[in-house]
Image (cartoon, rainbow, N blue to C red):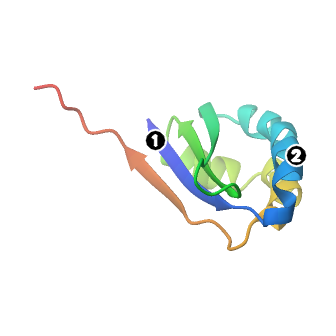
Amino acid sequence: MILEVAVLHIKPELSDSFESTFKKASKIIASMEGYIEHQLQKCLEQANKYILLVRWETLEAHEIGFRGSEQYQEWKSLLHHYYSPFPVVEHYREISLND
């Protein structure tokens, strides 16, 4: 399993609109093959800062499957104009702490 992490800085005047639009966009990502779950968290210290956490079965499910899809184009048109600057997206894998 892969965890996608994106810190989203939203243009300050668009935070309320972003949250509403993200609810619509959530249906897009949730429909993708290899998708497991996602969360959007809002920062308490900075009102226009969010973190998006998405669990994927594989890195390819995100990088190739989702980003290479027609659905991604819809996601992009719904959300990308809210970001300033554009978010850095990173992927993580869990480290087992059990021996």
Residue occupying the far front of the picture: 45
Mark 2 → mark 1, Cα distance in angstroms: 25 Å
Q: What residue do we see at 67% from left, 34% from top?
A: 33
Residue 70 percent across, percent down from the top left: 83, 52
- 2 and 1 marks in contact (CB < 8 Å): no
Q: Nearer the viewer, mark 2 or mark 1?
A: 2
85 lies above or below 25: below
List the residue tagged with mark 2: 21
Viewer-nearest residue: 31 or 20: 20
Tell me where residue 73 sits by quadrant.
Answer: bottom right
Q: What residue do we see at 68% from left, 74% from top?
A: 85
| Badge 2: residue crowd in 10 Å (few <14, some 14–19, many ≥20) | some
In this rendering, position of residue 38 left or right of residue 97: right
For the N terminus, the quadrant is: top left
Residue 7 percent across, percent down from the top left: 58, 58
Q: What residue do we see at 16% from left, 25% from top?
A: 98
